[in-house]
Image: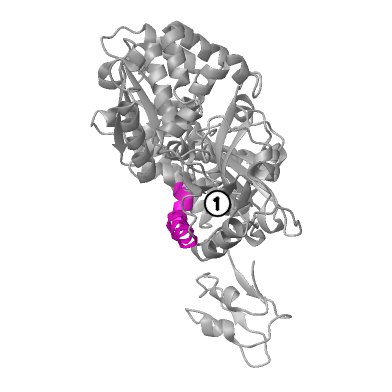
Amino acid sequence: MNFYRSQILICGGTGCQSSGSIELVNTLKKEFKKHGIENEIEIVVTGCFGLCELGPVVIVYPEGVFYSRVEVKDIPELVEEQFVKGRILKRLVYHESMDEDKVRSLTDVEFFKKQRRVALRNCGVINPECIDEYLAFDGYKALEKILFEMTPDDVIQIMKEAGLRGRGGAGFPVFMKWQFAKNAIGDEKYVVCNADEGDPGAFMDRSILEGDPHSVIEAMAIAGFAIGSNQGYIYVRAEYPIAVKRLCIAINQAKEYGILGKNIFGTDFSFDLDIRLGAGAFVCGEETALLNSVEGKRGTPRPKPPFPANKGLFAKPTILNNVETFANIPIIILKGPEWFAEIGTEKSHGTKVFALGGKTNNTGLVEIPMGTTLREIVYDIGGGIPNGKKFKAAQTGGPSGGCIPAEHLDTPIDYDSLQQIGSIMGSGGLIIMDEDNCMVDIARFFMDFIVDESCGKCTPCRVGTKRMLEMLERITQGKGEEGDIERLEHLAYEIRDASLCGLGQTAPNPVLSTIRYFRDEYEAHIRDKKCPAGVCQALLSYVILKDKCKACGICAKKCPVNCISGKPKTPYEIDQDQCIKCGTCMEACPFGAIIKA
């Protein structure tokens, strides 16, 4: 066994890899060898730390020094200072503010202070491609415990007492789904993991699979024991190559250690896992569409009932939970349901992982106790809105969710509170918007996504969402008419009540929530033919301010359609009938004399 004087953790998640973290690893190895210290320092490639905005992230132990935005060109100096001379390279250390001359460890960073990592407990901590590291962090002890100390009913009872609800969007109690499948009659039963994750901007499940794949494998085996299943399937989108690779490695390692396969730990319980790749269809996030896809059929929803717990994969009893749900299960078994139930609120126990994106200083992966307010997420964890802009709205739940306005910034993030204000928890996408976002255009964007992703099986979703999109496009193009808002609302309720599956039933949510909270923006588009946020191009006008114009002619030279004219020492003018509203003139003007109007 090697004993190292230092250990380096380097983020190997998709985000940091795209920023060159693997090149950092290779360069570090060369520099260590150059200085003859390659056997003194261990390099560990981990999953996502969460603070994606600062990637690539490098953490050095035992000091706990947090280096951010490290580049290959920095490595020779970093090795020289940190590992040869024993001095911290302060210019690369992450500081909470530019004025703070203080080195901080990961646990001191504001981004993490209000978080509680349960599902993400091992992400950024262990090497996900090494089963021994997972075992060192109590890996597979929960599986061992249930096999030797519990009955299937005991396991389901623990899920009930813990109050774990599905983290994939609907929030259905896990114990109920498992109990239904256990009680269902069938010679074969299946456990399926939904790792499809189709929401725009969402990467929670991907990060768990990349950073801690064994936790999902262990949880699926526990679920198999609870319901009487010997076979599981992980349905993961093919666009997640790193997650798929690490899953394959983890499954093979578990089989080599006898943790998957026949007679696990010498008991009479057997359980195996296979991976099925999805082609990236959003509708396959719906459980019955996913099951069809696993079977090799077209990914379209099935009418319910029967529900999958009674007739699911290959018409056999099946339970289906998402990655984050499974990631919670081993630690609940080990620490007890009371421990988990104490986290969160009375009706929403535990934590929730969010992919925090959009207009916030700290974008990345966050895990907060249920009941944390939106304000705490945006300002304490997210670091506020860039450039001093005002918070306008937060979109939760992706295309199925709603927009939460500033008046609800102090709303606790839990299932019931979000539902009361017209949104949903969803799988965990959280997009922050500021004053420069047009809420009508946001609704149009999500409806455009839904139209593209609708499977077309039922008329309300296939035709209704298309009609809604057409109305939204007309409004953003300045062609809206009186009564369009009421028509949108009426059609939204019809689609919600008549669609076959959850995709169609929740598709109108972004439109309904933006009308509810930002009706004045819709009215401005329709009545005044103005976009208050200056986003909808057809409603924009570019105007030259005469008192600022220097008559230099730069704007006229840059205009692609020659619609700007003027004379020396005379302010220039834009022909609004000829202007294509590209904004090139405003970008080119060095005096700030051209504005949107």
Q: Is residue 266 magenta?
A: no
Residue marked by disc 1: 57
Foreground residue, 392 or 362?
362
Foreground residue, 202 or 486?
202
Q: Residue at x 43, y 6 (%)?
A: 151
| Region of the chain picked out in magenta, as a range | 12-35
The answer to whether residue 569 is left or right of residue 252 is right
**Residue 31: percent from the left, percent from the top?**
48, 61
Name the outermost residue toward the bottom.
Answer: 568
Query: Which of the 4 image quadrants contains residue 498?
Result: top left
Determine crowd level at label 1: few under 14, some 14-19, many 20+ residues with C-alpha closer than 10 A: many
Q: Residue at x 52, y 81 (%)?
A: 558
**Residue 26: percent from the left, percent from the top?**
42, 57
Judged by its main secondary structure, the magenta piece is: helix
- Which quarter of the image is occupied by the N terminus? top left
Placement of 533 over or under 488, stated as above or below: below
Q: Is residue 13 magenta?
A: yes
The answer to whether residue 55 is left or right of residue 243 is right
Foreground residue, 343 or 93?
93
Identify the secondary structure beneath mark 1: loop
**Residue 144: percent from the left, percent from the top?**
43, 16
Placement of 550 over or under 527, stated as above or below: below
